[in-house]
Image: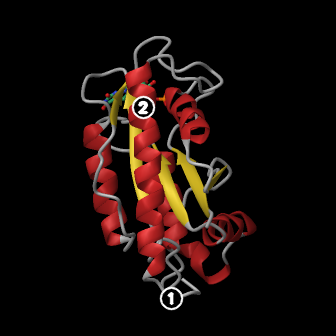
Amino acid sequence: TTHKVGYFIGSLAKDSINRKLAKALVRLAPPELEMSEISFKDLPLYSYDYDADYPPAGKAFKAAIAAVDAVLFVTPEYNRSIPGGLKNAIDWASRPYGTNSFTRKPSAVIGTSPGAIGTAVAQQNLRSVLSFCNSPQMNAPEAYIQFTPGLITDDGEVTKDTTADFLRTFMQDFHVFIARVRSVLPKDA
Ligand code: FNR
């Protein structure tokens, strides 16, 4: 069976290396995974003042998450955490109270940075947030991708075989994880 995966790209930058990584993951994903981006760039800064009457952008964002079977976070590390835009988006998805979009939604986390630790600290932060949001997370494999010039082309072609193999395995393992989690969830989850 196929599964829909919505992916978030933590960076808003035009030349984002995490966008390149996301393109690579789309190309390397097993055919059972239908990949689509969930964009958060048009969301205003969240406040609970919106909860009483969620604006169309917030509703559309939550609907996009509801429409997929799993979510994938492809994020840079900014100041040892996730970018503010991504945190803002997660806050939008988690509310209004009682309608948290991530509860029971399987997730995986990956990211790339030019630095040697390859977004490890940001991912650890993100995992804490996703735990609180009650998302079943793929614990392993972890994926800390150090971006070197030319590693992934603008079209998402990975130029190093060992990295391509690793990313392909990551997506295959995510597929197995999604299938396993979904098999024990109620049909309407
Ligand atoms: C960074 N960068 C960075 N890198 C890292 O490994 N750890 C960090 O804590 C930070 N902090 C940080 C803060 C801010 C505000 C910026 C703009 C950058 C460098 C970062 O990894 C690099 O700019 C990547 O290109 C970011 O990924 P995207 O946005 O290109 O996908």
Which residue corresponds to the image point at 52% horizontal and 21% vertical from the top-left? 152
Q: Which amino acid does label 2 sit on?
A: Asp
Residue 165's disc is 2
Find the distance from the CA under tag 2 to the CA under tag 1.
34 Å
- Outermost residue on the top side: it is 149
Residue 38 in view (yes/no): no
What residue would you read off at disc 1? 186
Q: In this view, does 61 lie above or below 108?
A: below
78 with respect to 24 (left or right)? left
Q: In this view, does 87 lie above or below 95?
A: above
Position in image of residue 90 (x %, y %): 48, 61
In depth, the one of 96 and 168 nearer the eye is 168
- Outermost residue on the right side: it is 56
Q: What residue type is labelled 1?
A: Pro
In depth, the one of 85 and 154 nearer the eye is 154
Q: Mark 2 against mark 1, which lies toward the viewer?
A: 2
Quarter of the figure with residue 16: top right
35 with respect to 131 (left or right)? right
Q: Is residue 29 above or below residue 79?
A: below
Residue 162's disc is none
Q: Quadrant of the N terminus?
A: bottom right
Position in image of residue 41 (x %, y %): 64, 47
